Image: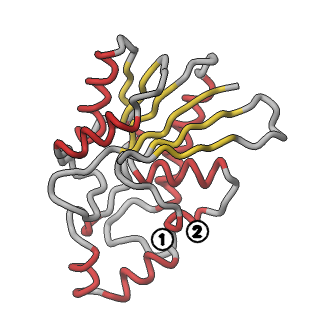
Amino acid sequence: MIQLGLLRHGEVEGGSCFRGSTDDPLTDLGLNQMRAATHHGCWDRVISSPLQRCASFAEEFAEQYKLPLVFDERLVEMHFGTWEGRTAVDIMNETPDALRLFWNDPDAYPPPCAERLSEFQARVLSAWDSIISAGNDQRTLLVTHGGVIRILLCHLQQRPISELLTIEVDYGALFSLKLFDDPLILPVIELTQSD
């Protein structure tokens, strides 16, 4: 059995927007959300997105518990092209059809100049395969982004990628996973939400 935690970064400076690969820092609240979510966990290693909203906590956590830390570029959030750093309200005001189409079918209607959802999925699952194959029964904490976690949960729950945006992943959410050697046993997924 392999045990993993999927931790989404906490609240980020700049408010809610299509942040993607824009490298904004955490707020103090965001850092505390991540600390609260991982307070009771026991981990053997940490793997993180290199973006500072994940990396700053991952470095602190790994240093505090003397854990090995690896940064993996494949765990970076999807790039939203011209929507990077913009709010849904702004986009809705300018191009309401584009936003509606994206929400309904994000792979067929990506934002202009954005990473395709299928490419993002392939990148994330490549990282996932590497992490699982090197698991060695270690308890691994992945510090990453909402989109990455949604991709992984769709994969683990055998849901179509079209359901990606129906999965709720709040700031500081920690999904604890237990993956079994028997492929007929579905993974156990539990959510720990920080207050």
Marks 2 and 1 in Cβ contact (< 8 Å): yes
User: At label 2, which amino acid type do we have?
Assistant: Ser
**Mark seen at residue 137:** none
Name the residue: 70% across, 54% down: 158
Residue 126, given in percent of the width and then of the height, sits at: 54, 39
Number of callouts in the render? Answer: 2
Q: To which quarter of the image does residue 113 belong?
A: bottom left
Report whether 146 appears left or right of 14: right
User: At label 1, which amino acid type do we have?
Assistant: Pro
Residue 155, given in percent of the width and then of the height, sits at: 63, 50
Q: Is residue 193 above or below residue 140?
A: below
Q: In this view, does 81 lie above or below 50?
A: below
Other-residue count near label 2 (Cα within 10 Å), few / some / many at <14 / 14–19 / ≥20: some
**Mark seen at residue 106:** 1
Residue 57, given in percent of the width and then of the height, sits at: 28, 32
Assign a secondary structure to mark 1: loop
